[in-house]
Each structure stands twice: as C-alpha cells, then as structure tokens.
Image (spheres, helix red, strand yellow):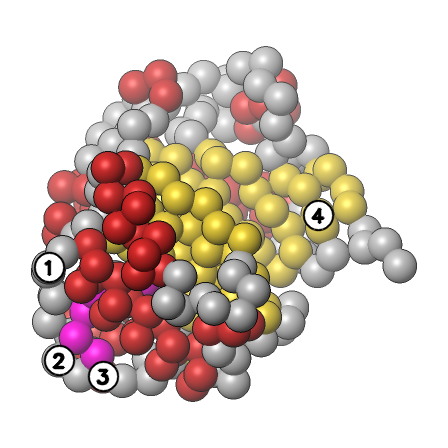
Amino acid sequence: MSLQRAVIPPPLPALDAGRSFDQPTSMLVRGGDFLFVAGLTALDPKTGARVRGTTAGETDQILANLKQMLEAAGSSLDKVVKVNVLLHSMLEAPNMNEIFARYFADPPPARTVCGARLPDGVKVIIDCTALA
Amino acid sequence: MREVIAAPRPGLDLRHHYGHWQSPAIRAGGLIFCSGMLPIDPETGERMHGTLTSEAHVIFANLKLLLESAGSSLDRLVQVHALIYDSIEYDVLNRVYRQYVANGPPARTVWTAQSEAGFKIQIDALAAA
C-alpha cells in the first residue's frame, strides 16, 4: 500500500520561495494524513521579495503567509501539530513567542525553538507539520 | 484529529511557567509530536542547569513521563533530534543517550544550536502513539 504524496503549490506565486530563489524545495508536500511545510522566511506575499525586519516583524509576516498557504491547501493553523522555529538569536525568543501566540488559537501546537545560523541575514525560519 | 497531551506533572507545563505558547505534545495521525524537551524539574518547573549529561538525564526522565502519560513510551520513539550547544560533546551525548534507547534506537539527527536559557541540550521527539 502506498500513501498519497502530492506537492501543493502556494496560493500566490510570490509565496513560492523555492521557485523565486531557485531553491530545490517545494513549499508544501502532502504525505499520508499530513502536510509538511518547508522552512519559511519572511516574504512579501505580493512581490515575493524578502521582508527584512525585526524578529517580531519577520515572525508576523511568516505566520500570515503560513496561514494563507495552509488554508489554500484545505488545512489551517488549528490543524498544525508541530512547529519548529529557528531564530538568529535565542535572546529574541520572547519577541517571537508574543507574535506566535496571536496566530495560534488555544490549544497551541507542539513547538521546538532554537537559535541557529540562518542564511542570507534572515532572522527567523519557521517550518511545520499539519494535519491535511 | 488533533489531541493535546497535557503536562503529566505540574513542572512540565512550560506554557504556565514560562509563557511559551505551545502544548507539551500533540497526538495526531497515530503519532505523538513532542515540544522541544528541556531539563526542567517536573514538579516545580525550575530550570535544571548542569552538565550535558545531567541535563540529558532530566530530559529523558521527563520525556518518559510525557510519553507514558500518552500511552506511548521511550521504546516507541520514531525520530529524535538532539540539539547540543557544542559538537565537542557529541561522544558525551552518545554515552547518556544510549542508556535510554536500548531496544532499537529511533532515527536520530544531532546538530549544534542554541537552546533557551543557555541549556546544553534540547531534545525534539516523535513517537508512535
């Protein structure tokens, strides 16, 4: 028996970072009961350009885009089971957390937060797994 | 369906103690997704800073509590990410880690990253429900 696997294009072409930045990644892939979302950086959903801001600002933009992408794929933030947040500095974790709490309703998903060296001067990367 | 696994001990409710907007674990699709596990006193929520080895012992004890409260166990771990503060401790990690995964260890990835409050290790776990 094989499980369903499907690449799901983002609802707006500007959110397809894989294509815009010529990276070999899909943004959403359905596998079995789950949707797997690529690590998202802050992009302007109209132009696809990088949004460079504070940790809070980038988190806000990423989660707004994530919401739109999940809903277009028939899922939603309420169906997210696990989120991984990569920050350029763990000193910024409270700033990320405050914005995070505005997007995810109670009860929130499981989450792991860590500080890591991120490419291209990016301050936040967020990936997640959701129920399809 | 998505089901929240509540903290099995009061200290493990990081949302209550530290305001982290996260559930301890979520059960969905036959799997249990755990939030990044940290060395926290399971009764008081106090941060248990120590060596990588001592922190890992606290984390695995907490992970055992969490998984068993959800009807799973350390033997049912599927995938583990171990985030350590410095790769120089890789062998130290292995020494403590192998004590907890004696029966067919889960798929594992180790890398270097910062964890909150300067902890030396954080463990991200996925288990079969």
Q: Quadrant of the N terminus of chain B?
A: bottom right
Task: Identify the residue position indicated by label 4 in the image.
Answer: A30
Give the spatial CA distance, label 4 vs label 3. Answer: 36 Å
Give the spatial CA distance, label 1 vs label 2. Answer: 17 Å
Q: Is residue B48 one of those drawn in magenta?
A: no
Relative to A86, A128 lies left or right? right
Q: Are marks 1 and 3 on the same chain?
A: yes
**For the magenta stretch, what is the residue range?**
B37-42
Disc 1 and disc 2 in contact, CB within 8 angstroms: no
Q: Amino acid at mark 1?
A: Gly
Relative to B113, B40 lies left or right? left
Task: Identify the residue position indicated by label 2 in the image.
Answer: B44
Q: Amino acid at mark 3?
A: Pro
Q: SS of the residue at dot 1?
A: loop
Q: Earlier in the sequence, mark 1 or mark 3?
A: 3
Q: Nearer the viewer, mark 1 or mark 2?
A: 1
Q: Chain of mark 1?
A: B
Question: Considering only vertical position in the picture, is B59 above or below A65?
Answer: below
Circle on res. B10 = 3
Task: Identify the residue position indicated by label 1 in the image.
Answer: B50
Question: Considering only vertical position in the picture, is B45 above or below A79?
Answer: below
Give the spatial CA distance, label 4 vs label 1. Answer: 41 Å
Residue drawn where x is 30% and y is 75% of the image: B61
